[in-house]
Image (cartoon, coloured by chain):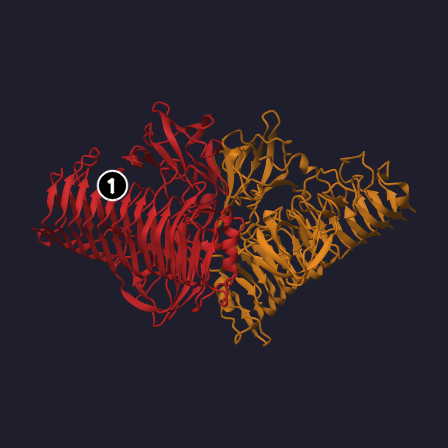
Chain colours: A orange, B red
Amino acid sequence: MSCFSTSKKGETIVFDLSISEDATPKVLQRFLDTKENNPISEIKFEKGTYHFYPDKGYEKFVYISNHCDLMVSTPFPIKNFKNLTIDGQGSTFIFHGVMIPFLVEESENISIKNLTIDWAEPFHSEGLIVANDDKNKTFDMEISDEYPYEIRNGQIYFIKPYYEHSLGQSILYDPNRSAIAFNTETYTGITVKKRTTTYNGIENIKYKYINDERAPEYKDIGLEARIHVEQLKPGLVRIHNHKKKLPPVGMILTMKGEQGFNRVSPAFRVTHTNGFNGTNINIHHAGGMGIIAENSADLILDSFNITPSNGRMVSTTADATHFVGCRGKVVLKNCTFNNQLDDATNVHGTYQKIVDVLGDNKIGVRMMHHQQKGFVIAQPNDTIGFVRLDNSFFPYEKNTVKKIEYLNSRYQIVTFNKALPKEIKSGDLIENLSGYPDLLVKNCNISKNRARGLLISNPVNTVIEDNFFNTEMEAILIPVESSYWFESGNAANVTIRNNVFQDSQHSGFNRGVIRFVTDDDNQNIAFRNIEIDNNTFNHFDNLILEIANAEGLKFTNNTITNSGTFPQLFPENSAVKVKSSKNIIFENNTYSGKATNILETDAAANSIAFK
Amino acid sequence: MSCFSTSKKGETIVFDLSISEDATPKVLQRFLDTKENNPISEIKFEKGTYHFYPDKGYEKFVYISNHCDLMVSTPFPIKNFKNLTIDGQGSTFIFHGVMIPFLVEESENISIKNLTIDWAEPFHSEGLIVANDDKNKTFDMEISDEYPYEIRNGQIYFIKPYYEHSLGQSILYDPNRSAIAFNTETYTGITVKKRTTTYNGIENIKYKYINDERAPEYKDIGLEARIHVEQLKPGLVRIHNHKKKLPPVGMILTMKGEQGFNRVSPAFRVTHTNGFNGTNINIHHAGGMGIIAENSADLILDSFNITPSNGRMVSTTADATHFVGCRGKVVLKNCTFNNQLDDATNVHGTYQKIVDVLGDNKIGVRMMHHQQKGFVIAQPNDTIGFVRLDNSFFPYEKNTVKKIEYLNSRYQIVTFNKALPKEIKSGDLIENLSGYPDLLVKNCNISKNRARGLLISNPVNTVIEDNFFNTEMEAILIPVESSYWFESGNAANVTIRNNVFQDSQHSGFNRGVIRFVTDDDNQNIAFRNIEIDNNTFNHFDNLILEIANAEGLKFTNNTITNSGTFPQLFPENSAVKVKSSKNIIFENNTYSGKATNILETDAAANSIAFK
């Protein structure tokens, strides 16, 4: 499609409700008509409700980080645009089926504001637990007509227009709190699969190169259904053979289908774009994330809210926001991130594995995780770090990129401006040191969602202030993630101040509310210059802070109390755990929690200061 | 990727066996390096065996007519090339996994010769029937280690490197004849699916626009597994619940997985290319067709042979050759088309449905069959026919194309040079009258395959001469296919001469060896100017010719005998059936078959002449 980049001031388009039954064709036609001599500067919608169907939308195959890779349909193919504003003026956009509402690529200064995004039918399904039977290991679930289903050979499939999903990934919601159920890990995820026992010759299948057995195309191998589903009457099903504890009556089981197949429609997808503003946006649902931004710069989300609609427990079926390889400023402010089925935000780069050294300045790299397929690690002149995590979490050498040849979604050839380091070898990783942002998360409400609040691997600058957290896993997780997701980034210059941490980590994991952790079990430093100041931890359990592989961390002026909201899950825990770290300072904190032991540490006494 | 079109004489590249372990990276690198100042004219391979893996291949999403639509890998991305020859010099190319060996797009005068294509592991699987049990409705199948499998919840999955398939579509081969088993329709396909009986709310799912329930994404709805598979010992499985007659002991069941998912790797894919020569090519296998050509012109296949290797029953898992919307000359000569799991050739266009009249000269059209998704019906200035099949098999008006806007794989907007016909309405079809060829099929051996020999809808010119046919369905099928596949084209100017038809239609269908048929049950003429002259029909059964909706057909100088090869399946049949036709002439034929009634017709006596 021909899009445009122009300095000429474009037209202001106003769409009215005459297009509301399916706004896709008219909106798309205007995009298709955009040429150098017919640019758009602003698109406004008369306030009202507009439906968007995929049937006549603009179609494109997209590799989306941390989503499925697939052909999607969009009414807003914003590619090669500059200085474009889309103003919903308070309108609601209802999407139908597998679509990406806003597909923003290779653009500059794009603003989208004042609109609400929802889907007519959600990409997940919900069922109310109405009975359970410990003797027969069954539980019964009531499924409303909002979630049509059929049972095929004892497996349940939820059928939507344009989409279907199996039970798959699931978690319990407590409808009284409209939040993840306390201690849900005891009950969920429903154990849908088990190992197969009958096969022949599979063990002889060999691959010449690395094969990712976790990729969707291989993940069925060796597995079959463990549970089976019986319909007691239409709308009431019995689940047999669940291996964990049976879900309690009154809870709501939210189900989104199998991992690797269930993230098909994020609300915003932004790539290779400099300047993106999302303001006064309400996203009630998406079959994936609220926004996934990759290789972009200066992204400001202000009052960019994720909340469920129509009495549903779930808003988006994956993270509220997610930033991969983004630079410049990334700002989340005044946002509500509620009830999404994954983190409020992730910020990281990618580690890519060197599989071929092809010359003095040329390597072949492989994308290791299938959800990073198609990700281009760098732009020309970006600084790449060469990393060998066994030795250090920091690069052993740096170089700048001359050229990247994209051969396929798993394999790219990177040519550098200078010669490669002498010690380079296959198996080393690369990361893009230019691809991390100045991150600010301010005045956000992060609660009622599955998983973490903030998951951040960012060695540049991170400020987290004035937020409220009530998450079922860590409120803030700061990892070096090298072994599964290959999401790059250590962390430095992190300020966490003036936040309220209310009863996070309540789903059953024995982990801290704030947690610094590396996959690689060694003594090397991964995290530097961390300040945790003036926060309130109102926590039902003991463990509020876990620190590993950190150097230079100050925990000051914080207030820690016990909320009494839930029974303690791990009363034996200390309030703080520290390992493989140095120069850790605790100063002027107020503790009125229940831990008998405040600090558990492997460190020499002189590397941790209490004042 | 940057490819090139140049008049400059390019380099001759010779690859030697040093690259044979995985020839993909070096071959591809040379394609990537091709620029205006570095063109290639010829690529030669030192004679030997070369392996090609997908891991470092060039990747592209392709919509392929009559195949799956998917991301594929190729070592030969021949796009925007002119005057390129690839000479295998007798080499064998072994492919691994989901690849398209030769992806030829938007090129001119491409010649590929003197090579053999095979796959390390086939995309289908074979099992020997070793027992059956009528009482318990089971049969037992021995599966060699060549076909690794696992059983998941009673269903068998064949696992290959990079691919897996279920039992799915299946047919019996007779290993004594290395051909489709006599009367296989009594036994196969194995009835793998049945209707589901347990569901809730499915009936309330509504679509705003036409929905293709046959498309892969919807085809599981309402179905579940009927059969179940039990392993008796590794390599020996028992199939329960097959509904048809149980396959006889000693036959080989060939299985290729579910329709809509099992055509992923044709050997050659040619689109928008003028001039393609395939000479001295042996294709032993492909996960799809030997060659699928679309929107191309002047395609000459000479000694382009499809035969199985390694003792397998099956060569390619779909048609040997297939031409959609091709023009100029299409020639198949001196070819062997053996053991493929679909027709030797198909030649047709597409019918696309008018769903929106968007202005004086603009329509929105929908691709009706999912295997036509992404097909662009015409080039600018092509002549389009407007068709209403209820009224006529021929267009009610013509117009030429100004522009096609491709919005998505199902929906395109066609703008014409002149105003639309006044009587146009949604639901009418369009076909491209410029997109049919002069077709010659000469001196080919077409046998041992599933389905037809030639399936041709071509209103231009067709000559079929000096061929040998021994196919399980029609040797030659000439249809107007409007209701399921939406493959366009009536037929005119068809000459069928000097061929031998040996025992076709032996799999159990009550149909003729040569058959003219329309989906639409009316009296209108679809086929004109047909000559069937000097052929030999050596047939085990009676019915050699079915004619419907034809005007002007001469059947002359043919010799019809009974072969005695198989028992007759339909001894009550006449030798010839004619309906809704006129000016049909039978002259100077010799009949020594077994039919007591030579001709069955609904026609007035004076429209059929016997001389």
Q: Position of residue B366 (x, y in %)?
A: 40, 58
Q: Residues within 10 Å of mark 1 (few under 14, many from 20)?
A: many
| Residue at the image position 32 percent from the left and 42 percent from the top | B450
Q: Position of residue B149 (x, y in %)?
A: 47, 34
Which of the two residues, B450 or A559, is positioned nearer the viewer here?
B450
Left or right of B112 in this view: A300: right
Q: Nearer the viewer, residue A227 or B107?
A: B107
Residue at position x 32%, y 68% from top? B399
Output the chain of dot 1: B
Under tag 1, what secondary structure?
Answer: loop
* Relative to A77, residue B70 above or below: above
Residue B287 visible in the shown view: no
Q: Where, by quadrant of the figure, is residue B582 drawn?
A: bottom left
- Residue ranking furthest to the right: A611
**Number of marks in picture:** 1
Front residue of B11/A194: it is B11
Horizontal side, residue A193 vs residue A568: left or right: left
- The answer to whether residue A440 is above or below residue A238 is below
Instruction: Report whether B472 appears left or right of A177.
Output: left
Q: Position of residue B580 (x, y in %)?
A: 18, 52
Farthest residue to the left: give it: B611
Residue B486: image location, x then y, percent: 34, 54
Indicate the amino acid at tag 1.
Gln
From the viewer's perspective, is A242 left or right of A152? right
**Residue located farthest toward the top when viewing the structure as drawn:** B135
> Which residue position is annotated with label 1?
B505
Looking at the image, is B234 positioned above or below residue A488? above
Question: Does residue B462 appear in the picture of this structure?
Answer: yes
